[in-house]
Image (cartoon, rainbow, N blue to C red):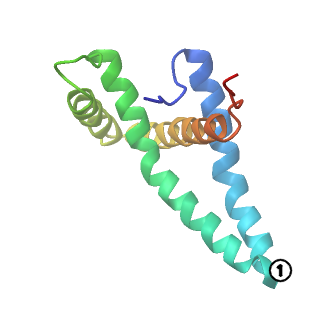
Amino acid sequence: ARHAPLGSGREALLSGGIGFLALVATPIAAVILVITVVGLPIAFIAFGLWLIALYLAHIVVARHVGEMIAPTGSRTGTALPLLIGLAIVIVAINLPFIGGILSFLITLVGLGALVRLVHRGMFRPQVTEA
C-alpha cells in the first residue's frame, strides 16, 4: 500500500509548502486556461481535481495521525487508525479560536502530501525484468 509522504517533521513542512503552492497556483493556472478557449476543458478538469484534493486533504492527514496512534496491524486493518485520526482531526478543527488555523494547516499539509503521492506514482522509475 502506498502511503502519503508525511513521515517526519521535515517531510510535513515540505508537504505544507507544496500544498500552499498547489492551493494558490492551481486556480490561477485554471483561470489562465479558461482565457484561452482551447484550454477550457482542461481548466474545468483541473479545477474539479483541485476541489477533490482539497476535500481529501483532511483525510490524508487524519490517516497519518491515526497510524501514529494505532499502527496498522493485521488485526486492526486501516479502518481503526483512520477512524481515530478522523476523530482527532475533527475535534482539532472545531476548537475555538485556533480551529480555523489548524484546518488551514491540515489542508496545506494534506494537499501537499497528495501532490507528492501523485507525483511519486507518475514518475516512478520503471523496473523491467530481464
Please determine whether, in this image, residue 128 is positioned above or below residue 36.
above
Please determine whether, in this image, residue 38 is positioned above or below residue 48.
below
- Residue 95 in view of the camera: no
The percent position of residue 67, horizontal first and vertical second, equals 33, 21
- Mark 1 neighbour density, 10 Å: few (under 14) some (14–19) many (20 or more): few
- Label count reads 1
The residue nearer to you, when weighing 93 against 64, is: 64
Instruction: Tell me the SS state at disc 1.
Output: loop
Quarter of the rendering occupied by the N terminus: top left
Please determine whether, in this image, residue 70 is positioned above or below residue 104.
above
The percent position of residue 86, horizontal first and vertical second, equals 28, 37
- The residue that appears at 18% across and 22% down in the rendered structure is 76
The percent position of residue 11, horizontal first and vertical second, equals 60, 21
Q: Amino acid at mark 1?
A: Thr
Asked where in the image residue 32 lies, by quadrant, the reply is bottom right
In the displayed structure, does residue 105 sit left or right of residue 120?
Answer: left
In the displayed structure, does residue 100 sit left or right of residue 92?
Answer: right
- Residue 105 in view of the camera: yes
The residue nearer to you, when weighing 79 against 9, is: 79
Farthest residue, direction bottom = 37
- The residue that appears at 29% across and 30% down in the rendered structure is 85
In the displayed structure, does residue 38 sit left or right of residue 92?
Answer: right
- Residue tagged by mark 1? 36
Asked where in the image residue 98 lies, by quadrant, the reply is top left
- The residue that appears at 78% across and 72% down in the rendered structure is 33
Quarter of the rendering occupied by the C terminus: top right
Asked where in the image residue 47 lies, by quadrant, the reply is bottom right
- The residue that appears at 66% across and 41% down in the rendered structure is 122
